Amino acid sequence: MKGKIVRLHEKLINGEITSLELTSKYLENIRKFDSEINSYITVTQEEAFKAAKATDEKIAKGEKVPLLSGIPMSFKDNLSTKGILTTCASKILSNYIPVYDAFVVEKLYEQGAVLLGKNNMDEFSMGSSCETGYYGRTKNPYNYERVTGGSSGGGAAAVATDMAVYSLGSDSGGSVRQPASFCGVVGLKPTYGAVSRNGMIAFASSFDQIGVLATTVEDTAIVFDTISAYDAIDATCSGKKRDKCFEDINRDIKGVKIGIIKNLTRELSGEISKSIKDSCESLKSLGADITELRIDNLDLAMPVYCILTCAEASSNLARYDGVRYGYRTKDYESIDEMIRKTRSEGFGSEVKQRIMMGNYVLGAGRYENYYKKAMSIRQLIKKSVDEAFEKVDVLLSPTSIVTAFKEEEKLKDPIDMYLSDLCTVTANICGYPALSVPCGFDNSGLPVGLQLMGRNFSEKLLLNVAYKFEDANQIIYKKPKGGAYSFEI
Amino acid sequence: MQKEELERLARLSMFNLTDDEIDSFKNRMQSVITFTDLIEKAGAHADFIFENSDNLRNDTSCVPFEQSDILSNAPTVKDGFFSLPEVK
């Protein structure tokens, strides 16, 4: 299924529309919908018009422009943008203006991307509902009383409502895929090390990965190809040669071995179960070889994620002290008082809880039983997943065991909130790529997402399988009536 | 999770917690700890191996940012330095 980017690019170079007109249309959508949906923290109209004009001038001169040139897009507000407010949806960074661009921001600017603004998120990416941020919750475009999922909920909602053609988010436990599933868009978490994290504000460094949110699989592939490159500044960024995913994305998937993860499909609600079964039938009819398998130790994935991400967050967030940047409290007499008051006033409760949890599991006498044991089980989970990949090429499950839940429904119970990422965390624990593609709707008309996970650097195969699935099912055209979601597909 | 333990963690984390926060965090953190105790009880075990596949850069000097840029976000600055209250 042809994506938006290629079609808009063709319109731009054929003179059917200018980038300035296109950008104005997207900004108009932001004005129309975002006072309600709240998907943007900052809108960068001036910068957007400047970038749009630059593309229009090149086209007017007859210059060849890249596919992403002149296309309006957005970034999650944890990606550093030089001269543009970058808050991580936290009071503690509510006045922070980076002095450099993140690697991925540079890569997209080089292609002529038009930045519309910075998207709302859970504070420091800590959450699965886009409700924990300083700037209020983002509403699901399908039903305003429902959450978008998180933490990249702002970007998912913006893409779903044509307030951005695509968006970059980040995924530490499902933060791109779960909101993609809840908002009916495509979300890709690349292989750990495929995309540089240079300039991304860290939550849990060994889990964090920048990902793509877009309306179609083809758009996702185009953006991923652009941002996936070696960067010497990020020591964990791989020097491996990348396959171009957009090229021959339409190739046959006959004989591709897909394994349904039995332990993640066992207790699904009827509607989600039906969508997953229908998806498997569809993939089978496309020639894929479908089998069922069980992966050991997956029941330990969520506690492992919980311990390790909190431990890493407690270290990463120790830097926020009101000394060099960000919010600083007003009244203080000593440096100790200044730091304590700054951090107490600057962080929200979810962030405070995870920092304290991190210090708990790293504490003397607990390090062995919690942190070290979680690290060893992380390896055990990876080993179990690797054994599955000896039998199949792709692992399949729902992206989430639930569809978008009601606002504040899971805020009171941290475990209930964590469990909404049950299907997605394994990819982050192992560092493997995974994506979510829309595969149906529940009885309330809320989107259901299908997750595909592959071996390291298998994005080309994952996007190929997702493309064929999307093309065969055209779920995007089956959206129920109502809601504020996308108009022109 | 005892109140004293939570207060110790708050001190370590450089937070001042109100009584209401202490009550709320006590329950929430207890449920997270109970949940993570699953791994303590798990029989599964693998040897802990630290894998470091980092690509380290050559140690060469450079000037990536201007001093004025670095200081531009600081709440208080004096004579080209970050300015802080007295250490008591």
Image: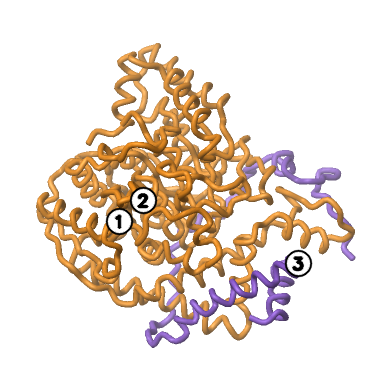
Chain colours: A orange, B purple
Q: Within the image, what quadrant is residue A334 found in?
A: bottom right
The dot on residue A181 is 2
Left or right: A376, with B77 as reference point = left
Q: CA distance from mark 2 to mark 3?
A: 38 Å
Q: Earlier in the sequence, mark 1 or mark 2?
A: 2
Q: Is residue A209 above or below residue A368?
A: above
Q: Nearer the viewer, residue A141 or A381?
A: A141
Q: Position of residue A381 (x, y in %)?
A: 35, 73
Same chain shared by disc 1 and disc 2: yes
Q: CA distance from mark 1 to mark 2?
A: 9 Å
User: What x and y, as percent, mark residue A95?
Assistant: 69, 42
Q: Secondary structure at mark 3?
A: loop
Q: CB of mark 3 within 8 Å of CB of mark 1?
A: no
Quarter holding the C terminus of chain A is top left
Return the residue at label 3.
B18
Quadrant where the N terminus of chain A is found in the figure: top left
Q: Are marks 3 and 1 on the same chain?
A: no
Q: Circles 1 and 2: CB distance less than 8 Å?
A: yes
Q: Is residue A366 above or below residue A428?
A: below
Q: Which residue shows up at 29% across the image and 47% down it?
A: A438
Query: Closer to the camera, A274 or A30?
Result: A274
Mark 3–mark 1 distance (CA, rounded to whole Å)? 42 Å
Report the disc number at residue A466. Answer: none
Under mark 3, the amino acid is Thr
Q: Secondary structure at mark 1?
A: strand
Nearest-to-viewer mark from 1 and 2: 2
Q: Label 1 amino acid?
A: Gln
Can the viewer see residue A276 in this picture?
yes
The residue at the point 41 percent across, 85 percent down is B42
- Of badges 3 and 1, nearer the viewer stands 3
In percent of width and height, residue A439 lies at 26, 49
